[in-house]
Image (cartoon, rainbow, N blue to C red):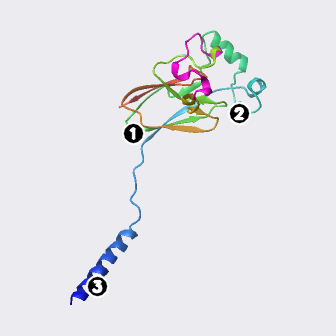
Amino acid sequence: MSQAKLLLGVVMLLGASMALAQTGPVPVASAPIAQIVALDECEPSSFNAVLGPDFCKNIALGATTSFSKLFGEANDGHPDPNWDFEPDTLTIRQGTVLNIANQGGEPHTFTEVAHFGGGFIDGLNSGQQTAPECSGGFGNVAVARTRILQGSNVNVSGLSKGEHQFQCCIHPWMRVTVQVK
């Protein structure tokens, strides 16, 4: 009789294990995502003549800005407003992942700074001091990690509650403020 009970117990345990295995994986809730888009209007022939082939890969139809015009406007204190992060301000809940998509024609950075300032290219700073977080350009590993190549994206997660400021360290007028609730 005790062998029968043991056999019955093993069969029941096996049946329960098989039933649990049949239910499949437990779905995991994913974090909410908020997207920020990096935009620019680099004009390929002038940018590529100065910076090398395929540097500017702008495929947008319509307005473009030449390399010399971009620097001229920035030096005059009126940088091209079409080099931009959209939206400029964003409120998210803690745990939300920021997805930054570069839909422009050239590289950008999405660098968190304590205070907005200039970038690492003096001719584009409109007289502003370089933000310390942008110092050293891509020779600074912290800046290099925030680079977003044309057509790619990067995710930023783990932001604490409060206000966070991000800017492009190449085109420092590209700025966004993120409020985390």
Q: Nearer the viewer, residue 132 or 112?
A: 132
Q: Which residue is mark 3?
A: 7
Q: Nearer the viewer, residue 96 or 82?
A: 96
Q: CA separation, marks 1 and 3?
A: 50 Å
Residue at 52% x, 27% y is: 111
Q: Is disc 2 surrounded by few (<14), some (14 to 19) or many (20+) residues within 10 Å?
A: many
Give the label on residue 95, or none.
1
Give the residue furthest to the bottom.
1
Q: Nearer the viewer, residue 82 or 117?
A: 117
Residue 72: image location, x then y, percent: 68, 13
Q: Is disc 1 surrounded by few (<14), some (14 to 19) or many (20+) residues within 10 Å?
A: some
Asked if residue 139 lies left or right of residue 21, the reply is: right
Q: Nearer the viewer, mark 1 or mark 3?
A: 3
Q: Amino acid at mark 3?
A: Leu
Residue at 56% x, 33% y is: 145
For the record, the magenta segment spans: 123-140
Give the residue furthest to the left.
1
Residue 100: image location, x then y, percent: 53, 35
Is 135 covered by the magenta stretch? Answer: yes
Give the label on residue 130, or none.
none
**As drawn, 6 above or below 130:** below
Residue at 37% x, 36% y is: 94
Q: Which residue is mark 2?
A: 57
